[in-house]
C-alpha cells in the first residue's frame, strides 16, 4: 500500500530532526509526526467504516462516516476512541499535540521553547499506537516504484519477500525508529513548567500596565474584576446578536450585521456594568483574585508528575487559562497605551 512509504519516510526524518535538536528541527519533526499519525488515523477510520458498512446492523450514521473519511482530525480521533483504539487521555493528548501543528502552520512561533519536547512525546505516542492502528502485519501490493529500494530501506524484511507475498513488520519498524530518536533537551515536565512560568510572568507584567488604571490609584483587584466583567458582557452581547442574525437569516429577513468593534467604546463606562446586571445577573469572575502566583505554583508541580500524558493535560489547562486572560486584557492594555501617548502629546503641546 503506497501510503506506508511516505509514512515511514516522515517518521524516519522526524527521528533524525529530533536527534539534531534546535528550534527549526523541532518544528519540522512535530509537523512530520503529525502528518504521519493522521495518515494512520485516516487509513484505520476508512477500514472501520468499511467494516461497519458490511455489518448487518451498522452502528455509524452517514454523518459519522463522512466525518471519518474527511479532513477533520477531531472526528477521526473520536471514531478511533469509540472503537477502543484510543483511551480518553490518549485522545485528549493527541488533540492537544495536533493543535501545536496547527499553531505552527497558521499562527506562528508562540510556544517555541516546548515544541521539541512535545514533538518527542508525539513521536512516542505515534510509535506506540502504529502497530495496532496499522495491524501487526500490513500486506502490500507489489508495485514497481516500491521495488527500487526506497521501501526496502525502511522495511528490510522485504528483501527476501516473494513478488506477490509481501509483508512489512510495523512493530519492528517502530522499534528501529524509537532507537534512533535521541533528542537532546530538558525533561518534558521541566520544559513545560519553565514555559508556563515564563508565560505567567509575562501575563503579570502585562496586567501591571492596567492594574492601577489611568489614575494610578485603582485597586488591582477591582481592575481584574472589571476587565473580566466587561469581556464576559461583551461576549454575551455578541452571542445574542449572532443568535438573532441566525434567526433573521433563517426567515430570510434582511439585516445589517452587527459590528463588534462598536462595543469597544463602552469599555470603562457604566453602560457595560448595567448590561452585565441585566444579561448575566448571576455573573462571577473566573479569577476572583490575582491568578499569577497560583499559576506559578501549579506549573512547579508539573515537575513532580510521573505520567507524561497527565502532565500534558495539566499543562494545556493552565496554558488555556493564561491565554484567556491575556486575550481579554489585550484591548484594555492597548487603550492604556493610547492614553499614555495622549498624555505625552499634551505635555509636548504645552512646552
Image: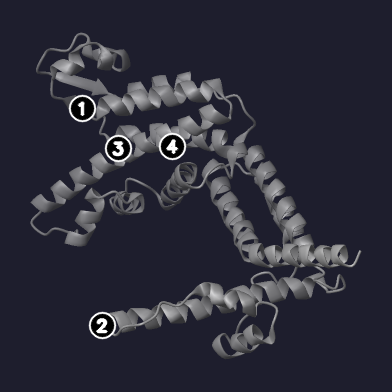
**Which of the two labelled residues, at mark 2 and mark 3, occupies the earlier sequence position?**
3
Viewer-proximal residue among 209 and 202: 209
Residue 101: image location, x then y, percent: 45, 42
The quarter holding residue 11 reads top left
Tell whether label 3 touches label 1 (CB within 8 Å).
no
- The residue located at (58%, 57%) in the rendering is 320
Res. 125 mark: 4
**Which of the two labelled residues, at mark 2 and mark 4, occupies the earlier sequence position?**
4
Q: Nearer the viewer, mark 2 or mark 1?
A: 2
The quarter holding residue 178 reads top left
Q: How far apart are marks 2 and 3 (CA)?
A: 44 Å
Q: Distance between the residues labelled 2 and 4?
A: 49 Å
**Which of the two labelled residues, at mark 1 and mark 3, occupies the earlier sequence position?**
1
Residue at mark 1 = 2
Look at the numbered disc 2 and give the secondary structure of its residue.
Answer: loop
The quarter holding residue 275 reads bottom right
- The residue located at (24%, 30%) in the rendering is 3
Answer few, some or many: residues within 10 Å of disc 4's Cα (few below 14, many 20 plus, some between 14 and 19): some
- The residue located at (34%, 21%) in the rendering is 172
Q: Nearer the viewer, mark 2 or mark 3?
A: 2
**Which of the two labelled residues, at mark 2 and mark 1, occupies the earlier sequence position?**
1
- The residue located at (57%, 85%) in the rendering is 280
Residue at mark 2 = 252
Look at the numbered disc 4 and give the secondary structure of its residue.
Answer: helix
Residue at mark 3 = 40
Amino acid at each position: 500500500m503506497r501510503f506506508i512509504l511516505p509514512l515511514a519516510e516522515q517518521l524516519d526524518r522526524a527521528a533524525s530532526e529530533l536527534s539534531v535538536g534546535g528550534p527549526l528541527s523541532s518544528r519540522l519533526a512535530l509537523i512530520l509526526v503529525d502528518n504521519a499519525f493522521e495518515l494512520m488515523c485516516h487509513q484505520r477510520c476508512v477500514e472501520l467504516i468499511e467494516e461497519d458498512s458490511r455489518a448487518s446492523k451498522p452502528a455509524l450514521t452517514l454523518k459519522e462516516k463522512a466525518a471519518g473519511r474527511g479532513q477533520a482530525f477531531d472526528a477521526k480521533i473520536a471514531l478511533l476512541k469509540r472503537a477502543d483504539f484510543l483511551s480518553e487521555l490518549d485522545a485528549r493528548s493527541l488533540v492537544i499535540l495536533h493543535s501545536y501543528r496547527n499553531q505552527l502552520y497558521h499562527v506562528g512561533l508562540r510556544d517555541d521553547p516546548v515544541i521539541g519536547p512535545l514533538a518527542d512525546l508525539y513521536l512516542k505516542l505515534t510509535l506506540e499506537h502504529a502497530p495496532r492502528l496499522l495491524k501487526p502485519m500490513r500486506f502490500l501490493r507489489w508495485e514497481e516504484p516500491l521495488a527500487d529500494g526506497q521501501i526496502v530501506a525502511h522495511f528490510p524484511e522485504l528483501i527476501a519477500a516473494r513478488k506477490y507475498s509481501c509483508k512489512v513488520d510495523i512493530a519492528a519498524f517502530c522499534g528501529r525508529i524509537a532507537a534512533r530518536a535521541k533528542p537532546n533537551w530538558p525533561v518534558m515536565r521541566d520544559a513545560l513548567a519553565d514555559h508556563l512560568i515564563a508565560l505567567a510572568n509575562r501575563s503579570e507584567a502585562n496586567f501591571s500596565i492596567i492594574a492601577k488604571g489611568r489614575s494610578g490609584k485603582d485597586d488591582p483587584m477591582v481592575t481584574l474584576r472589571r476587565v473580566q466583567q466587561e469581556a464576559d458582557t461583551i461576549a454575551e452581547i455578541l452571542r445574542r446578536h449572532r443568535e438573532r442574525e441566525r434567526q433573521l437569516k433563517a426567515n430570510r429577513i434582511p439585516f445589517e450585521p452587527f459590528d463588534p468593534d462598536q462595543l469597544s467604546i463602552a469599555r470603562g463606562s457604566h453602560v457595560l456594568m448595567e448590561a452585565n446586571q441585566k444579561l448575566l445577573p448571576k455573573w462571577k469572575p473566573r479569577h476572583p483574585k490575582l491568578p499569577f502566583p497560583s499559576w506559578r505554583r501549579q506549573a512547579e508541580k508539573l515537575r513532580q508528575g510521573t505520567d507524561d500524558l497527565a502532565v500534558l493535560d495539566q499543562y494545556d489547562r493552565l496554558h488555556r487559562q493564561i491565554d484567556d486572560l491575556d486575550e481579554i486584557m489585550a484591548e484594555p492594555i492597548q487603550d492604556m497605551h493610547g492614553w499614555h501617548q495622549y498624555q505625552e502629546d499634551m505635555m509636548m503641546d504645552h512646552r
